Amino acid sequence: MLFPLLRPALFALDAEQAHGLTITLLARFPRTAPKSAAILRTTIAGLDFANPLGLAAGVDKNGEAIDGFFGLGFGSVEIGTLTPLPQAGNPRPRLFRLVEDKAVINRMGFNNGGIHAALPRAAAARRRGVLGINVGANKDAPDRIADYAHGVAAAAPIADYITVNISSPNTPGLRDLQHGRELTDLLAAADEARRIGKTPRLFLKVAPDLDPSAIDAIARAAIEHHVDALIVSNTTISRPDLRSANAGETGGLSGAPLAPLARQRLRDFRTATGSAMPLISAGGIDSADEAYARIRAGASLVQLYSALVFHGPGLAQRILRGLVDALQRDGFASVTAAVGADG
Ligand SMILES: Cc1cc2nc3c(=O)[nH]c(=O)nc-3n(C[C@H](O)[C@H](O)[C@H](O)COP(=O)(O)O)c2cc1C
């Protein structure tokens, strides 16, 4: 309720400062997680989610406000991307609001305090929902696959699921891991590294900038290497028509202009996986209608980031209320029943 009043003050700050302030406030004053309606409960890859709305990676990279985000209503919170060693990321400014386009461009470059600093915070959090830990490679890693294996093994005792993120456009060469031998070697290493005692689920996060043959190859490799779900997608390096002054900045674009591409990639991966694997849709989700449309198009879960910048922290609860209404209106007994209803 306060967000419309605070928004001008937050938007007067540099985007990264405003983000830091939000994390600090949520970390200091976490609310008790609201109870989700029973109709929103869903199970994916053996994990029980109170609702299908997740916080996408990159918002709480260091796991500083996990309970704060659960308190906003999210059924899952994905922290990271975390790399084995702390790293500063790219020089500032590196995060840009595109207000007229309801979009964001970022070239953060995996700035984070390192996985070993974040894990104790994740272990100590009350975690009123599913916790994902998103892992990546350090920019200067001599062996990137070894960095992923390191992150997966370190996160395995604590995470409910681990996301292997090979789709950030801001670490040069990282997205090459989405192809060929590098992809299969990486997935084999990640699958082996997670099998320590309690085996967390393994998710793979892909870019939206992929051609049809790459989509088929990723789907095949993911199924073969026991990936439990695909997150479709990360930010795009493409530039649809944009109006804002910051449109020319280098980096990954997210928010409303990403929605058409993210919808298309969801359909593409559904075809490529033959519905054999749960899909998590991210990219431009900013309303209950959009979340519901992704679910009907085949998403088992949805995630968001950029819409929080423009619509504020109350958005999660608004989306959840709208989802309940839509499911009841269309006669679905559960969110699971609506997954892929549009064929
Ligand atoms: C500032 C910013 C930082 C991000 N950092 C990460 C990250 O560290 N790891 C990751 O997997 N995705 C990251 N993302 C991508 C988001 O998780 C999400 O996939 C993408 O922004 C599309 O969703 P949206 O349109 O709702 O923002 C980041 C996005 C933004 C805007």
Image (cartoon, rainbow, N blue to C red):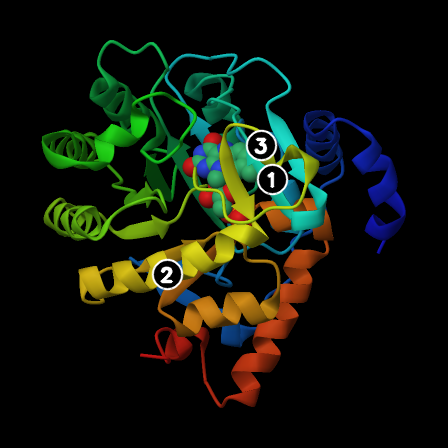
For the residue pair 39 and 180, the one nearer the viewer reads as 180
Pointer 2 with pointer 3, Cβ within 8 A: no
Of mark 2 and mark 3, the one earlier in the sequence is 3
Q: Is residue 326 left or right of residue 41?
A: right
Q: At x 51% / y 63%, what residue is drawn?
A: 51
For the residue pair 35 and 311, the one nearer the viewer reads as 311
State the image quarter where residue 271 is shown.
Answer: bottom left
Residue behind mark 1: 104
Disc number lying in front (2 or 3): 3
Q: Which mark is residue 248?
A: 3
For badge 1, the amino acid type reads: Val
For badge 3, the amino acid type reads: Gly
Of mark 1 and mark 2, the one earlier in the sequence is 1
Residue behind mark 2: 264
For badge 2, the amino acid type reads: Gln
For the residue pair 97 and 241, the one nearer the viewer reads as 241
Disc number lying in front (3 or 1): 3
Secondary structure of residue under mark 2: helix
Residue 218 visible? The answer is: yes
Is the shortest distance between ligand 1 and the CB of mark 1 under 8 Å? yes
Residue 55 visible? The answer is: no
Residue 6, x across and y down, in percent: 86, 43
Secondary structure of residue under mark 1: strand
Residue 315, x across and y down, in percent: 68, 57
Vertical comparison of 13 with 292: above or below: above
